[in-house]
Image (cartoon, grey):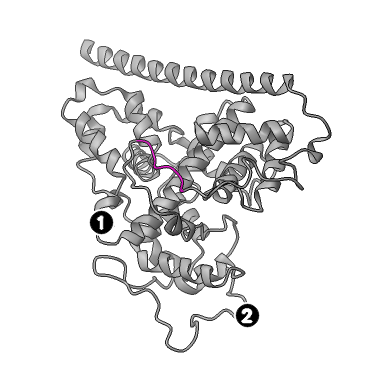
């Protein structure tokens, strides 16, 4: 009994320490944003926000500099892909809800005589399942690969469980959307929880599991880099989506801190997981992901939903929603990512704008859609356009 009380006290101390550290990080970020605002307030801006550079009719933030590939995630596990490869890996997921639509009239699977689609390779899904239900059974949560840096960190800590810092472990997992999915799903399954009772934060899930049970549940992890080692083009496509997700999460966290939203960490996770179905596709059926990308590049006006229905027989947004419920992801996390059902939520808006600016600025700040994004973000944050522009660049460079 005394040992149980001591173990419980240690777990609570670790949890409190993790919360305190996270709180200090949020306070530091808020202080940086406030300092930036004070500096902007001291500088003469002149004119209405719409008339200054960076407004709807002005130049995008940062001017029209050369396009640059997004940076790798923490730890540098994902190699930097070429600008050409990343340019062709733009999102193919519209992020809208509703039922699966029929393909638009005039959309054809063939691009002309002699057209050869991207061929599947051994070891991957050979053809798209015919229904959403058949897609669901293709994804076993225990078998999902993770980022190499996550797998390496887990093995270092496994060698000395007594030295594990739950906050540090949570940070590594929190920045890997695939490992985050695995942890949330395992907690729900192991504890018999429904989505409404699953911890909303990775660190909370780790505290509920305990260090020993966590490492017993998660042995050495297969990595995405291993799975796609023989298919560089597919690895570059995955890297592009992952880098975009990590940038979206950073933008979302900064927006939430600026708005003094107490759910900043939850909003960070929602943005990171916003496009997880697209990540799954890149390492499960790379030939389908590459084929969708090829068709959208050849026909820029083609709707992404049409391409998905034609090649996958489902929309990625519907597949992601079904997987989220199947794996019992936290209910509030799902609510924040569902713009269709919660269109007036400021938290939903925060995630949507973060995802949008990350997508449009993936190759630099000269995309024609960026000025409108900046205007909407400025309204969300209650800032003028020029300070918003500086804030975005600061987030991206930091």
Q: Main secondary structure of the magenta part?
A: loop
Q: Which residue is mark 2?
A: 105
Task: Look at the image and give the residue range highlighted in magenta.
Answer: 69-74
Q: Is residue 3 visible?
A: yes
The residue depicted at 49 percent of the width and 41 percent of the height is: 247
Spatial CA span between label 1 and label 2: 39 Å
- Residue 101: which disc? none
Number of disc labels: 2
- Image location (x, y in percent) of residue 363: 52, 50
Q: Is residue 315 above or below residue 58?
A: below
Which part of the image, by quadrant, shows the N terminus?
A: top left
- Residue 229: which disc? 1
Secondary structure under tag 2 reads loop
Secondary structure under tag 1 reads loop
The residue depicted at 34 percent of the width and 46 percent of the height is: 78
**Foreground pick, 314 / 246:** 246
The residue depicted at 67 percent of the width and 39 percent of the height is: 377
- Image location (x, y in percent) of residue 13: 35, 14
Residue farthest to the left, as pictured: 159
């Amino acid at each position: 009994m005394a040992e149980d009380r001591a173990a419980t006290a240690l777990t609570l101390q670790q949890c409190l320490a993790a919360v305190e550290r996270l709180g200090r990080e949020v306070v530091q970020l808020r202080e940086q944003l406030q300092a930036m605002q004070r500096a902007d307030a001291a500088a003469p801006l002149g004119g209405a926000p719409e008339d200054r550079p960076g407004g709807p009719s002005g130049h995008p933030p940062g001017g029209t500099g050369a396009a640059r590939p997004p940076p790798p995630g923490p730890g540098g596990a994902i190699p930097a892909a070429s600008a050409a490869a990343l340019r062709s890996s733009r999102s193919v997921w519209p992020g809208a809800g509703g039922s699966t639509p029929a393909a638009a009239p005039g959309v054809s699977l063939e691009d002309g005589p002699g057209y050869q689609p991207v061929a599947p390779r051994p070891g991957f899904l050979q053809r798209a399942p015919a229904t959403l239900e058949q897609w669901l059974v293709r994804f076993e949560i225990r078998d999902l690969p993770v980022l190499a840096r996550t797998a390496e960190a887990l093995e270092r800590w496994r060698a000395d469980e007594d030295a594990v810092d739950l906050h540090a472990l949570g940070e590594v997992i929190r920045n890997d959307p695939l490992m985050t999915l695995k942890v949330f799903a395992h907690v729900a399954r192991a504890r018999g929880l429904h989505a409404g009772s699953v911890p909303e934060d990775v660190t909370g899930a780790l505290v509920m599991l305990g260090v020993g049970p966590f490492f017993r549940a998660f042995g050495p992890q297969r990595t995405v880099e291993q799975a796609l080692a023989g298919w560089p083009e597919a690895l570059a496509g995955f890297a592009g989506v992952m880098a975009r997700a990590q940038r979206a999460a950073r933008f979302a966290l900064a927006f939430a801190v600026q708005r003094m939203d107490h759910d900043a960490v939850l909003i960070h996770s929602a943005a990171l997981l916003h496009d997880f179905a697209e990540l799954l596709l890149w390492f499960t059926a790379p030939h389908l992901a590459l084929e969708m990308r090829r068709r959208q590049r050849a026909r820029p006006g083609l709707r992404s939903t049409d391409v998905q229905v034609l090649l996958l027989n489902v929309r990625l947004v519907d597949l992601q929603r079904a997987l989220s419920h199947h794996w019992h992801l936290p209910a509030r996390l799902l609510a924040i990512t569902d713009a269709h059902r919660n269109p007036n939520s400021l938290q939903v808006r925060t995630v949507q704008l973060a995802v949008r600016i990350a997508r449009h600025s993936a190759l630099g700040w000269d995309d024609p859609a960026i000025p409108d994004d900046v205007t909407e973000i400025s309204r969300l944050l209650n800032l003028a356009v020029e300070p918003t522009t500086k804030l975005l660049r600061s987030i991206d460079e930091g």
